[in-house]
């Protein structure tokens, strides 16, 4: 099975042997992917979507393709805490919900009500609020019925879906505090969550960058042919290596400027992205630099998220100029 078999169009893709990917072009802010693993009468959903209506649409398509109703889904694995991978959990009220311990803690920190409030305030919060309201305009945060994880793990958790062996592998902190890979060894397939943004700019909320590069290396060491990213088209190991190359590039460029005394803001505005400038949401360089600077300083001081959205808005304006 090769990645190019599945055209990057909206909807359900049959990966073969009871595995499916749900893709949402263009893969930008909030437009995440998900997956379904079935064997016999057992099933596992890899992630839900950013709101309940989007998740219900996905579950309806899965039912049309497989006969599996939402209430039949036994397990949800949330690959990490970002809402575009877990806000639809409430659409499956009976499912066991599994995630890493770190992700479960992080889910509590940014509830959908907070996103709804930021979105409503919009321009009242200045450029940051306008940017936030614009990128998240399509999503309904008000109607999210949260469901927290019912089981957590650290390191690795092995389980079965029917006769299929599944490995849940914690590789965070990287993109977020507790990123998880969902590996189906016998089908040579891995669902990566937001360890992979393909044709879009990776977004490093947590770091350290070495963990993220290590996660990419771990995927490349797996015996897998089909790699379903958190955002973007189904990919292969060349796509994984490209993500790692971006992270190495930004780390190298940011560290040079850090050591020269530039601020995180000036560095984000100064780095020339070259070929990476064609990737979606290139302004995320602002968050990536800020996280790298926190790592270089070693002080653990986290920039308020609304400031980061303001910096991304500024970088975006500069990139458009």
Image (tube, rainbow, N blue to C red):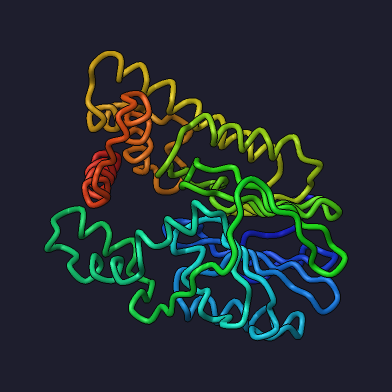
Question: Is residue 231 in sight in this rendering?
Answer: no
Count of numbered tags:
0
Q: What residue is at 72 percent from the left and 59 percent from the top? A: 6
Q: Residue furthest top?
A: 260
Left or right of 49 in this view: 267: left
Can see residue 213? yes
The answer to which of 56 and 183 lies nearer the viewer is: 183
Relative to 203, say whether 250 is above or below. Answer: above
Q: Which residue corresponds to the image point at 64% horizontal and 50% vertical from the top-left?
A: 181
Q: Measured from the top left, where is residue 130 in percent x and y?
A: 21, 60
Q: Where is residue 306? Give x, y as percent.
A: 23, 52
Which residue occupies 82% across, 58% down?
165
Locate residue 270: give its quadrant. Answer: top left
The answer to which of 3 and 172 lies nearer the viewer is 172
Question: Is 198 rendered above or below residue 126?
Answer: above
Residue 172, x across and y down, in percent: 54, 43
The residue that appears at 59% across and 69% down in the rendered structure is 97
């Amino acid at each position: 099975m090769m990645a190019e078999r599945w055209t990057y169009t909206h909807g359900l893709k049959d990966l073969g042997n009871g595995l499916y990917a749900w893709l949402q072009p263009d893969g930008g802010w909030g437009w995440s992917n998900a997956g379904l693993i079935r064997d016999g009468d057992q099933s596992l959903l890899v992630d839900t979507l950013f709101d309940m209506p989007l998740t219900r649409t996905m579950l309806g398509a899965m039912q049309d393709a497989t006969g599996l109703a939402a209430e039949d889904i036994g397990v949800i694995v949330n690959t990490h805490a970002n809402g575009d991978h877990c806000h639809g959990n409430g659409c499956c009220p009976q499912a066991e919900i599994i995630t890493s311990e770190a992700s479960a803690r992080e889910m509590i920190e940014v509830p959908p009500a907070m996103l709804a409030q930021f979105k409503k305030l919009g321009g009242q919060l200045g450029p940051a609020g306008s940017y936030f309201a614009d990128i998240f305009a399509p999503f309904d945060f008000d109607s999210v019925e949260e469901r927290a994880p019912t089981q957590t793990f650290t390191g690795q958790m092995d389980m079965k879906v029917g006769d299929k062996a599944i490995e849940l592998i914690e590789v965070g902190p990287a993109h977020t505090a507790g990123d998880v890979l969902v590996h189906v060894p016998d089908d040579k397939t891995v669902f990566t969550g937001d360890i992979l943004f393909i044709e879009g700019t990776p977004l490093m909320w947590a770091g350290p960058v070495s963990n993220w590069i290590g996660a990419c290396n771990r995927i490349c060491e797996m015996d897998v042919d089909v790699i379903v990213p958190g955002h973007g088209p189904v990919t292969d190991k060349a796509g994984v290596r490209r993500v790692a190359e971006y992270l190495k590039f930004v780390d190298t460029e940011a560290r040079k400027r850090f050591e020269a005394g530039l601020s995180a803001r000036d560095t984000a505005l100064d780095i020339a992205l070259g070929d990476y400038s064609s990737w979606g949401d290139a302004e995320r360089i602002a968050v990536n630099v800020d996280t790298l600077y926190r790592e270089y300083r070693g002080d653990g001081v986290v920039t308020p998220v609304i400031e980061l959205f303001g910096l991304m808005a500024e970088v975006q304006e500069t990139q458009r100029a």
